[in-house]
Image (tube, rainbow, N blue to C red):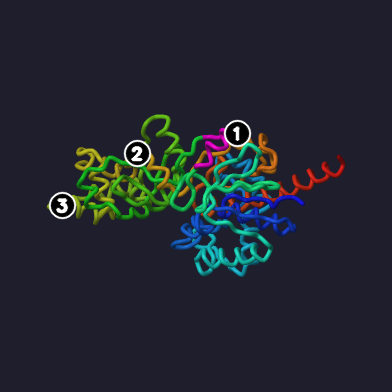
Amino acid sequence: MRDPVAIIGGGPAGLMAAEVISAAGVAVDIYDAMPTVGRKFLRAGIGGLNLTHAEDFPDFIRRYGERQEAVAHWLADFGPQQLRDWAQGLGIETFVGSSGRVFPKNMKAAPLLRAWLHRLREQGVHFHPRHRWLGWDSDSTLRFATPEGETKVGAGATVLALGGGSWSRLGSDGRWLPLLAARGVDVAPLRPANCGFDVAWSEHLRERHAGQPVKAVTASFGGHSRHGEFLVSRHGVEGSLIYALSAPLRDAIERDGSAVLTLDLAPGRDLARLTADLQRPQGRESLSNHLRRRAGIEGVKAALLRELARPEQLRDPAQLAAAIKALPLTLTATRPIDEAISSAGGIMLKALDNALMLKKIPGVFCAGEMLDWEAPTGGYLLTACFASGRRAGHGLLRWRASTSMKEISS
């Protein structure tokens, strides 16, 4: 009798692989370093679990940038609609928000996770918390650190779904990368994705405006523009608008040492109209009041304008309007990877076959954020994690069946 399948990592990718494999009647053991599974999934659901996105599939695929062709294969079998149908099967109804993002009707991650874990247990899946993977022994058994000491486990096949390198306190700490590199697996360094950036703020702006949202702005970089809002932090900037452009910004900083993000503080007005409004007589009115009355610029937006515009631009209406429409914000570094929502890098896709099995370690499949792909927030990360776990699960079942046939024939 074969050893059970071992799944290492209890996030969405690992749990989805477990569902596929256990539904086929194969025994599955899930090992996770944390006391409970799904911790990052639950954390992502604070404030509303953004499960996926309802935009057209071709647009959805483009969100994966350079990896869109590979990720499209995963999503062809289990895309946004299939994910919503799957959640419905767990008793979790979803809805499409005004932004196109898809949420559970109760907005929470916990009910979905509870229903899912109940179904997995009914399918015979066994959970082993507080088991930190240490790699393989010389005889290819799996090694784990536990509160009782090191233990070894034999596995008929393995799915690695250990997450990336962000939010280490929730289990995604990237410790697995050197273990795979030592076995000859091609890996790329882990880098922050969907991250904030450092800005050399003045002490005045930092003390007066850190923690304040900058709403209804357009940010542009490298031919990409996004509309939304971001947050001024003590260190720099963060938030959904920044995350949407974080990949090209990060790459530029790595290449050039800094990146200049262009902000349009008044996206609802064209330059000619704004210039005309600001050229109206200011009289004895302060610049702050003039900006507020003529351009709708006040609070943190006015502070950014004073911080980033040159003095001569603030004195000339035409230059002032141009600065409002294209304010340069220099980013000097990414924030640390442990602060990022997700990470890029990891197992290079060339190290895997189409079923997500490691070419150098047959019988070991990989899924989720530990693979070298990235996506913006908005449900894209979760959808691809689910889909990759499903693909790895089906790949493992096919590999298992094929090796069984070879054993019989021999």
Q: Quadrant of the C terminus?
A: top right
Mark 1 or 2: the one toward you: 1
The amino acid type of the residue labelled 1 equals Arg
> Quarter of the image holding residue 358?
top right
Q: Earlier in the sequence, mark 2 or mark 3?
A: 3
Q: Residue at x 77, y 52 (%)?
A: 1
Among numbered discs 1 and 3, the one appearing first in the sequence: 1
Residue sitting nearer the eye, 96 or 319: 96
User: Mark 1 to mark 2: distance in Å?
Assistant: 37 Å
Residue type, label 2: Leu
Extreme residue toward the right, this view: 409
Q: Is residue 379 left or right of residue 18?
A: left
Q: Residue 196, how many percent across, how many down?
A: 38, 45
Three-letter residue code for mark 3: Ser
Disc 1 to disc 3: CB gap under 8 Å = no
Local secondary structure at mark 3: loop
Residue under label 1:
183
Residue 93 position, x and y percent, is 59, 68
Which callout, 1 or 3, points to the residue nearer the camera?
1
As rendered, which of 24 and 286 lies closer to the eye?
24
Between the C-alphas of marks 1 and 3, the distance is: 67 Å
Start-end of magenta stretch: 175-188
> Could you classify mark 1 by the number of other residues whose Cα lies within 10 Å: few (under 14), some (14-19), or many (20 or more)?
few
Mark 2 or 3: the one toward you: 2
Mark number, residue 331: 2
Q: Which callout, 1 or 2, points at the residue further toward the start of the chain?
A: 1
In the rendered image, which residue does mark 3 sit on? Answer: 286
- Few, some or many residues within 10 Å of mark 2 (<14, 14–19, 20+): many
Point out residue 352 in the picture as x, y percentages from the top left corner.
65, 38
Q: Residue at x 46, y 53 (%)?
A: 170
